[in-house]
Image: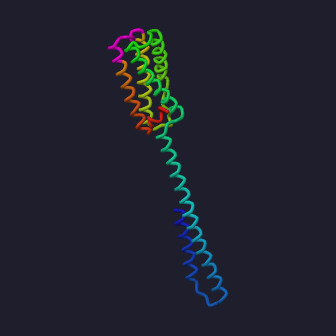
Amino acid sequence: MLLKTFQFKIGRKVKLLEMKRTTNKKKRKKLFIRKKKLLATKKTALKWFVFLFSISTIASLGTGYLYYQTLINLSSRDKQSILKGYSLLREFEQQIEISGNQSEEQIKTEENIRHLATKLASFGTVKASLLNSSEGQGRLNRYYNSLSQLGINTSQQVNSIYGNVELVTELLADAERAIKIERTVFSYYKVDENRLYK
């Protein structure tokens, strides 16, 4: 809008100069030079406008891209929480299976399960970073909540798990539900599960 107004004013001045007729050579030369300067000013203004418009477009696209990347990428705190949850879930499944098979001594197994259940229950205090998109926050909070519930349920039944096949099956099913929620988080944030093993 500003450029159009500026160009219109210059165009009007150029037309006024063209309308002036003079027989004096010096005056004609002065008019010609003024006209040339006005046209050069108009050209320069157009070049500056294009340059500044390009810069502002690139800057706004860059800002938009950074904002998008922030929304779809995990914060460092969420990365650590996911890694911790991932390893705790696998270890939890392993200890529950050991408890079901009675392949290790009861006291040691129950102590391991109690320790893991406490760590899983602590996910109740973890909330997804507000830098994530609302959908990403929802998925992460659902995941953290599933880990917390698994830990709370297990800690209430630690002494009844060893050798109890029915309870072991139930807890493994709960762990599998948490893993399914974990996979939705992985697919949303494009986390490569194979790299987590390393």
The one of 11 and 112 positioned closer to us in this rendering: 112
Residue 168 located within the stretch drawn in magenta: yes
Picture quadrant where residue 100 is located: top left
Q: In this view, does 107 lie above or below 173?
A: above
User: As drawn, is 118 to the left or to the right of 31?
Assistant: left
Residue at 54 percent across and 34 percent down: it is 76
Residue at 47 percent across and 33 percent down: it is 196
Residue 103 in percent (x, y) is at 41, 14
Q: Residue furthest bottom?
A: 23
User: As drawn, is 170 to the left or to the right of 11?
Assistant: left
Q: In this view, does 63 lie above or below 23?
A: above
Residue 94 in percent (x, y) is at 42, 21
Q: Is residue 73 above or below residue 45?
A: above
Q: Residue furthest left?
A: 166
Picture quadrant where residue 18 is located: bottom right
Residue 119 located within the stretch drawn in magenta: no
Principal SS element in the magenta part?
A: helix
* Residue numbers of the magenta segment: 159-170
